[in-house]
Image (cartoon, helix red, strand yellow):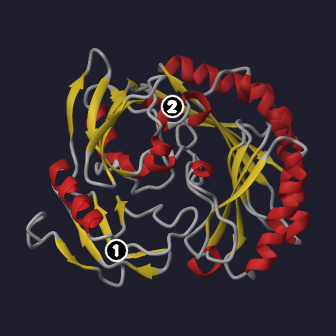
Amino acid sequence: MDICGPDYARVARTVDTVGGRRVGHVAVPATAHAVSDILSLVADRGLSALARGSGSKIDWGTPRPGVDVVVDTGRLSGMWNHDVERATAEVATGTPVHALQAALALQGQRLPVDPPSRTATVGGMLAVNESGPLRYRFGTPAEYVQSVAYIDRTGQAASSDGEDGRPGLAEIDGVITAATLRLEPLPPARRWVGVALPTPLQLGKLIETADDFEPSAIEADLPAGGQGGTLAVLFEGAEASAVEQAERLAGAWGAGAVVTPIAPPWWGVYPFRRDDVALRLSMSVADLPSAIYSLGDAAGGAVPVRGSAGLGTVHAVLPGTLPPDRITAIVESVRHVLLARNGRAVVVAAPPEVAHEVEMAGQRDLF
């Protein structure tokens, strides 16, 4: 209480859970120094601590055995040292990504990321390297991090630049407090091209055609139920260029392709909810249809799939009500198919009662 102030340190409430279990206490520090004092105290008493931004991904991956103190980064917010000419900025990691983008847009810049977690903070995004559709052209958020400042689990302040200019975020054991980020110009215009996708078999040819036009993103949405899906491609840049590229692709795709300045409603949104089991499938684009069909065969019916089809990385959804052994059998069946194709399948998120019974993605698997 002395570290954070009486209004910013409290006993955990029913909403303060990790892996379905209530934590002990919640601390909301306002400075990196306060984070250091908290983690020093936690270490001295042999307790465990975990950082929390908005909490949108706090239950991703392997469940933790228990957390004594949640370090809420909500007060570690803001941007400074914004060098417009050099296109860099230092950002506190409790800053919501959408707030950062709004501030950068005033200077005609952006961080080229679009994490599907709508409430994601900069720190939460970096903690699992959460990527959205823009990864197709711009890569992962980690690739835009020049350096990070963090407090290790013993309370010592540290920083990391990384040997190749990209800090090893997955190896940081502590709380990231700030990051220096590389920025990109904000594109003046955006256009989407969409086309119906009756079955996954058409993916390969359509994606190959779209790839020739150098888009910013290529995404697919394949709902369950046999109603078909949609493939959508994003073009960005000067308005004349974005429109021209979009119309050229629509012409190459043929009848049924539509150009619009508005993203599809499913664009950049995860197909799963908190009570679902979320799988991440990664493979070559050519093997994507085989993986989708093998998943459906193992599950006994079509499974919702959505994600970056242009990269061969998508999320699939299984009901959280399935027995853990059934989920394990489905995942192992898909892994067997992907193994021969150098692909991977991991369980990213699941309801707590399921997550404790199945093999979940480790920290490195989330990157």
Question: Residue sitting at 55 percent across and 23 percent down?
Answer: 242
Quadrant location, the N terminus: bottom left
Badge 1 local density, few (<14 within 10 Å), some, or many (20+)? some
Whole-percent x, y for residue 237 in the image = 49, 22
**How far, Cα to Cα, is label 1 from label 2?**
46 Å
The image shows residue 358, relative to residue 366, as above or below, that is below
Q: Which mark is residue 314?
A: none
Is 14 in front, or is 216?
A: 14
Sequence-wise, the earlier of marks 1 and 2 is 1
Using residue 335 as the reference point, say whether residue 185 is left or right of it: left
Is 158 in front, or is 125?
A: 158
Asked if disc 1 and disc 2 are in contact, CB closer than 8 Å, the reply is: no
Is 77 in front, or is 22?
A: 22
Confirm whether residue 199 shows in the render: no
Using residue 322 as the reference point, say whether residue 16 is left or right of it: left
The image shows residue 331, relative to residue 222, as above or below, that is below
Q: Secondary structure at mark 1?
A: loop
Whole-percent x, y for residue 282 in the image = 74, 45
Badge 2 local density, few (<14 within 10 Å), some, or many (20+)? many
Quadrant location, the C terminus: top right
Residue type indicated by callout 1: Asp
Is 134 in front, or is 173?
A: 173
Q: Which mark is residue 190?
A: 2
Q: Secondary structure at mark 2?
A: strand
Q: Which mark is residue 68?
A: 1
For the residues carrying marks 1 and 2, which lies nearer the camera in this image? 1
Residue type indicated by callout 2: Arg
Question: Residue sitting at 80 percent across and 44 percent down?
Answer: 343
Q: Quadrant of residue 215?
A: top right
Whole-percent x, y for residue 193 in the image = 66, 35
